[in-house]
Amino acid sequence: MSREDITLLKESLGKEELLRTLDDGEYAKTGFNYRSQATHDAIPAIAQIYLDRGYFLEMLTCLDRLADDEIFRLVYAFNRFDRCERHALDIDLKPTQAVATISQIHRSANWFEREVCEMFGVHFDGHQNLKRLLLPEDTDFHPLLKDFGRIEDAP
Amino acid sequence: MGLKDHDKDPQILQPNLVKADSEQRLMEEAAPYVSFHLLDDLLNRARANSLWPLTFGLACCAIEMMAAGASKYDLDRFGAGVFRPSARQADVMIFAGTISRKIAPVIRALWDQMPSPKWAIAMGGCTIDGGPFKYPNQYAIVEGADKLIPVDVYIPGCPPRPEALINGILKLQEKIKAGRRFEA
Amino acid sequence: MKPRKDAAALLDGETYFLNMGPQHPSMHGVLRLLLRLSGERILECEPVIGYAHRAHEKMAENRNYQMFLPNTSRVDYLGGMIYNLAYCQAIEKMLEIEVPERAEYIRVIVSELNRISSHLLWFGTFLLDLGGITPFLYTFDDREEILNILDRVTGSRLTYSYGRFGGVTQDVDQEFLSMSTAFIKRLRTHFSEYHKLVTGNVIFQGRCRGVGVISPDMARTYGVTGPCLRASGIPYDIRKAEPYGIYDRFDFDVATRNEGDNFARYEVRLDEMEQSCRIIEQAIANIPEGPIMPAKPKKRFKIPAGECYFAVESPRGLMGYYIVADGSDIPSRIKLRTPSFSNLSSMVEVLADTMVADTIAILGSIDLILPEVDR
């Protein structure tokens, strides 16, 4: 997305504070052409704009930052097929906060969100099938949380 | 589901699992009322020389198992090249790959579907004791195939070369016949 | 394996459930498909994965950066070299380590050899799934030659830990280069054999043409990448879109087809093998003398706080390492973006209106590695 497109994205979202640029053009260091941060209720609109502009959802993951900042950080990565334009979108969530699903917009998000839900416990509102993906269905823990399964806690 | 007590987890193991020494088990199962020694010998030779493995590759070791069955390291010359997709037609189950918690009940079900006499080969480090995926307090894998079923031959390696798998099959044949394939 | 909770509602006497897997004759691995059928036609398909989940991402948080190297090969064991070197390149990017020229050329040669061996295996097992056993034996013969070459240099046949942060472990000798050249020459003569054996075969054509079509829009919404995407007409190859290493110095084409069916994916992979041969030849012709590790290699790898996303073209598609560092020598998070995960998620739609018999053919043509899906 060029600079004009990013401005268009912010304008079509309506509110300036919904999308905040973190860095722009640091590809050589981070692998992302553009990084931004948004509030959790903006994500479906942002995802729709990215889809309409010809992007695909490359990755969706979560970072457990409960120890440092008491948040979960969802990282969405959008990219294009015709040139390398990898955009990262950070969404910070409080521990019990849920976020809207984008699985109806980007179908790949279906499994990404299921995986984030089972690994971290983040709930995605509106997801039709938020059950376990990689772990057995009756698993009752969320493995990728930092305080789960630590080596020092081994018996 | 606790992390450490998969030994006692009823989901994974059927009760009354006999984790006995395999040789002991073989002798108990084969203990006849009347011993036709020469016939037993003949039947054992027949079984050893035509082991039908079950196609059950789980992870990386499966590729080496396929390579062992392919043209360069032909398993068929030892009679073990007929991979059967159905457990009911197979003699030997070659565990090729890491056993995750999710697939453990499936493995137990397949083992129970195999008719006796049946044998098991644990191929690769993961099936011996968890291999490179074992670390204290891990949640994902079953540390070794012998936590689920009685294993006859263990083949170390990550992954073991096809020659190592062939060596393992020859050892199993020795075990079945209670003798070597070629006189040393 | 418990029955579905909504089973009673769905049992209407017209449709029935078929459980395929996780153990079944086909070669794609421990995948379970819950199929709802009406006769032979699939109405609904639900893949159940996780049977090869080995907790790579959790292990990454338990060990330091060097200790994660063996894991990288085992995520996708057929592209093990590419994954291993990609991880090294991601760390080199974060630490700004410069890799010597000779090491870069060696990396390209072994990566492309790895790509050819992966495609050869795919070729053999795809045909095995369709019922033809002979190509499997032929391609494995060629593949053994590649494994022999890589074994001489790295010490392993399948799961390599050949890369180090800054270069590679062992140098290659003239014998390696001449063996690779001879192998490329031999492989090229075998391509025509494979075409003669397989491509025109009536059964193969019938099972592949027009079957399992992935449209470009579907590919984009599902995040499909790699040969599956290129067979649908979109020429997206990371080696061209965001060149890493020294790939921008090589002259090769991006194999593309437009039909998006099994046959297109088959042709794309055969073309890719030819392109990899071209790259290897150019690399062998231009490889310079020199060291294979930096002059003063670092011993301790503490990466300052930050994050990095590094993408490479694996034989199955776009593979990305997303590494989050926190200043210590243990990663805060490593997320593996694997191509088969997204490629398989598109199967829900592709398989939704096909026949049961086509399922195996379509899944085979996608080229899945389940441990890569499950990590």
Image (tube, coloured by chain):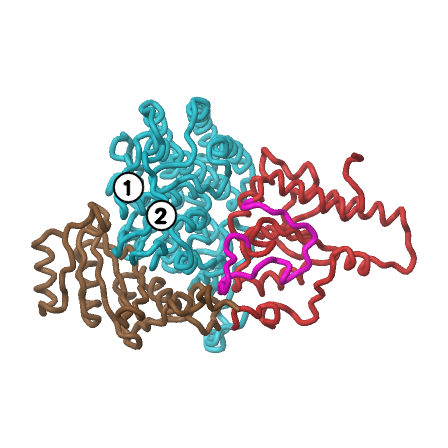
Find residue B86 and report its image quarter.
bottom right
- Figure colour of chain C: cyan
Helix, strand or loop under label 1: loop
Residue topped by disc 1:
C97
Chain letter of the residue carrying label 2: C
Which span is picked out in magenta?
A: B131-159
Of badges 1 and 2, the one in the foreground is 2
**Residue A65 at x, y percent in the picture:** 30, 67
Q: Is residue C268 visible?
A: yes
Is C271 placed left or right of C18 in the picture? Answer: left
Chain letter of the residue carrying label 1: C
Residue for point 15% across, 56% down: A23
- Figure colour of chain B: red
**Residue C59 at x, y percent in the picture:** 43, 58
Is B124 placed left or right of A130 in the picture? Answer: right
Helix, strand or loop under label 2: loop
- Work out whether C263 lies above or below A133: above
Q: Is residue C227 visible?
A: no
Residue B93 magenta-highlighted = no
Query: Magenta segment, principal secondary structure?
Result: loop
Q: Front-most of B96 and A143?
A: A143
Marks 1 and 2 belong to one chain:
yes
Residue for point 39% across, 52% down: C340
- Work out whether B124 lies above or below C22: above
Mark 1 surroundings within 10 Å by alpha-carbon count, few (fewer than 14), some (14 through 19), many (20 or more)? some
- The Cα atoms of the two marked residues, 1 and 2, are separated by 13 Å
> How many numbered marks does the figure carry?
2
What amino acid type should be assigned to the residue bearing mark 1?
Answer: Ile
Residue for point 37% across, 44% down: C299
Q: Front-most of C157 and A69?
A: A69
Residue topped by disc 2:
C300
- Figure colour of chain A: brown
